[in-house]
Image (cartoon, rainbow, N blue to C red):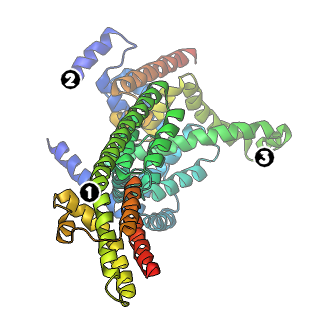
Amino acid sequence: MRWISDLTDKRSKDTIGEFEIELLLRGTPTISEDLADLEVFVASLSGQGERPADVEYMATVLAATARASRHSPRPALRRVMALAASVAVLFALSSVAIAADGAVPGDLLYGVDRAMERIGIGDGGVDERIVEFDALIERGQHQDAFEMLDEFAESAAVSEASRAQRHIDLAATKSNVIAAAAQEKVAAKQQLIEDNRGNDGVENGREFGQGVSDGAQPNDRRGRSGERVGNNATQGPPENAATGSDGTPPGQSEDKEPAKPDNADKANSSQRGDRTTGDNNSGGNSVGNSGAQSQNAPTKDN
Amino acid sequence: MSTTRFRSTTEDLHVTRIDAAKDGAEWAWESIYKDFAGPVTGYLRNRGASDPDDLSSEVFLQVARDIHRFEGDESNFRSWLFVIAHRRLVDDRRASSRRVDTVDEDSREIEAEGGDVEAEVMEHLALTRVEDLLETLTEDQRNVLALRIIGDLTLEETADVMSKRVGAIKALQRRALQSIKRQLEEGRVAT
């Protein structure tokens, strides 16, 4: 190795072989006479590496310094601790975010949901708003639902806003249809009641009037018993209506007690009965009243 | 073969020394300081530190403060030590270049007048010979020679300190030595 580089050295005086350079720099004497001057130079340079003074004193100071700075945890441990802490924080945040993400207005976490969306976490955009909207509709908070989606449509991007608007329109139409259907249903029910009450009401009223006038005739105590009948009558008609709708023939009592005299009372009560069929809802009461009145009429007569 | 085994044994020993130094053992610091204070101070002086001894102490104090952050073997430790020394040196030279501007010309002359003039001149000439030669080199070439000769670093350690590849360091040191050699020959011819 060495004599090879010596050969190359001889070829060009200026070139120093790699091996010679290593020897020179390490302060090992080379055999080459050419490098004698360079050896002296290197030696005087390396002589600048001086013997240190105060070694013991410096050792004490340095050891104390090392001990003092040892108290902070080792870098590896500190890194692990920092990592664990940030993972814990991330986990807590994400679980809150996940829990909050499904929140709808009025929920405890809804504020968190919106806050996180504002910084771009769990922002479902218009889709999420629509889900919330539907959830609110289902809960029956129609006004909240429409307000929420309206508000969103105002601030959202054009495409999202138009989707939100379409959903609002759709929901509104749907609810109109539902409302219309509900109205129809209510109307149909009322019609049914009206129809039933229309027949029953007259009969009931007549029957009632007769019942009362029957009770009124026999003796003086009938006043009180008549009152009692009157009271019963207030509850009576709905029962009758119910039996009527069940299909039970209402004319039973009429058959039992066919023609009771006192035409005036009869006419009166039947008149009342007609009127009661006129207004459906308060039918029961008016029948009761008519009963009370028709009861009063005979006592007056007596 | 035998040298490799010897080297690996000393490295094992050195790792122990560094571990002990982390624990604040005085014997470890004494050993480290004895081995490296000379090269570090010499390197700092050669590279133009304003107060090499003072700067060297600062370097070692920083090493003691930061040794817990150090991970590696003896060779890494030498590189790390000189990286710190080099950074300190750069800071020091920047600061002293500002200081020089404020130094009074007269005070410098007075300082130079005192003492045994003849002996100082002779010593000065020997020193200036080496320094003049170094002056003709580039900054990187000077740095490589200082780290390798005064700092006693290996090729790889020097590459580490200077953040260069080993090939680049080889080229730098060869060019530096050839340039010095040429000048020495020319000088001899001249005298």
Q: Residue furthest top?
A: A11
Looking at the image, residue B127 sits to the left or right of residue B174; the answer is: right
Q: CA distance from mark 1 to mark 3?
A: 49 Å
Kind of residue at badge 2: Met
- In the image shown, does A16 or B126 lie closer to the viewer? A16
Q: Specify which label sits upstream in the sequence, 1 or 3.
A: 1
Please report the residue visible at 55 percent of the width from the left and 31 percent of the height from the top.
B130
Q: CA distance from mark 2 to mark 3?
A: 54 Å
Question: In the drawing, what numbered circle is on residue B13?
Answer: 1
Looking at the image, residue B103 sits to the left or right of residue B182; the answer is: right
Q: Position of residue A142 (x, y in %)?
A: 43, 47
Q: Position of residue A10 (x, y in %)?
A: 31, 12
Q: Which residue is mark 3?
A: B114
Q: Which residue is mark 2?
A: A1
Kind of residue at badge 1: Leu
Q: Nearer the viewer, mark 1 or mark 2?
A: 1
Q: Chain of mark 3?
A: B
- Regarding residue B169, the answer to whether it shows in the image is yes
Location of the C terminus of chain B (image quadrant):
top right
Q: CA distance from mark 1 to mark 2?
A: 32 Å
Q: A200 above or below A43? A: below
Q: Chain of mark 2?
A: A
Please report the residue visible at 19 percent of the width from the left and 43 percent of the height from the top.
B3
